[in-house]
Image: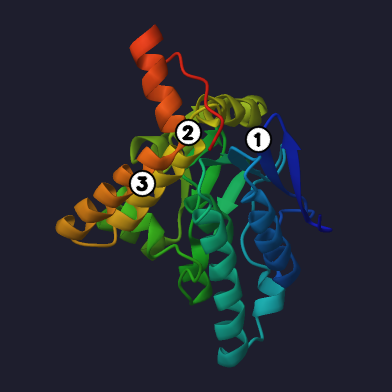
Amino acid sequence: MGEFVRLEIADGIGTIRLDRPKVNALNDQVTAELAEAARAAAADDIRAVIIYGGERVFAGGADIGVMAEAGYAEMAARSGRLQAAMDLVAGLGKPVVAAITGYALGGGLELALAADFRVAGETARLGQPEIGLGIIPGAGGTQRLPRLVGPAKAKDIVFTGRMVKAAEAHAIGLVDLVAPDESVYAAALDLVRRYAAGPALALRAAKQAIDYGLGVDLATGLEIERIQFAALFGTDDQRSGMRSFLENGPNKATFTGH
């Protein structure tokens, strides 16, 4: 795939692997390769996705050395590209889990926020430290974070720029599971496996209904749900799922993703 980001596929699960020493800093090349990997991960034969930075660090944020002397026009374009890459990850129509080791800071946390679930190591640290640089998060931190943990907790994290330990992150809902540091990827794999065998089209419809519904009023959200619900009655998985239920009882169906 790319020099710093690659997509590894095994048993229907795709792993978007960041590998830019030392801390997977998100420069323009990493951003472009991340977007490329997310597009490739949209393939139908990939049923779920893990985002992983390796055993030592998830992602330490943007490359400050590159940004320090940048001006408005340059950063407007660069932040647009970074947000677009995050949106491609968030828009994947399948379950996405961020497996967080070490640090997920700045753009690294914003990448984790683009996933559906987050698994963190016991010694992981998460945060939006941009305020200490005289700026604010620019790739989703002021938007996805408050939607996840609520505005007051998000403001505390953003206003202080502090690093949040894994236990606190779990307590406030920033991460969904804390695992031993050496088992983070395995825990993320166990998490996505429970979804990967499910009906792919129904999973995509559920994800879209939830995500799109969060941005609209209740009536519009209910209409989104109704349309997605009815559309699934044109799928093979709906027919085989209901037939299996009638003949064999619940949770016995095998789905093809069609």
Q: Kindly check if marks 1 and 2 are in contact, taking CB atoms under 8 A apart as contact.
A: no
Tell me the element at label 1: strand
Determine whether 79 is above or below 85 in the image. Answer: below
Q: Specify the farthest residue to the right.
A: 3
Comparing 229 with 11, the one in front is 229
Q: Position of residue 195 (x, y in %)?
A: 50, 30
Return the residue at label 1: 13
Comparing 99 with 70, the one in front is 99
Q: Kindly check if marks 1 and 3 are in contact, taking CB atoms under 8 A apart as contact.
A: no
Query: What's the residue at 53%, 50% (across, down)?
Result: 112
The tag on residue 236 is 2
Q: Earlier in the sequence, mark 1 or mark 2?
A: 1
Alpha-carbon distance for marks 1 and 3?
26 Å
Q: Residues within 10 Å of mark 2 (few under 14, many from 20)?
A: some
Q: Earlier in the sequence, mark 1 or mark 3?
A: 1
Query: What's the residue at 51%, 40% (across, down)?
Result: 95
Alpha-carbon distance for marks 1 and 2?
22 Å
The tag on residue 231 is 3
Tell me the element at label 2: helix
Determine whether 203 is above or below 6 in the image. Answer: above
Q: Earlier in the sequence, mark 3 or mark 2?
A: 3
Q: Residues within 10 Å of mark 1 (few under 14, many from 20)?
A: many
Query: What's the residue at 36%, 15% (across, down)?
Result: 245
Whether residue 249 is visible here, answered yes or no, is no
Type of amino acid under label 3: Ala
Q: Is residue 238 left or right of residue 133?
A: left
- Which-is-in-front pick, marks 1 and 2? 2
Type of amino acid under label 1: Ile
Q: In which quadrant will I find the N terminus?
A: bottom right
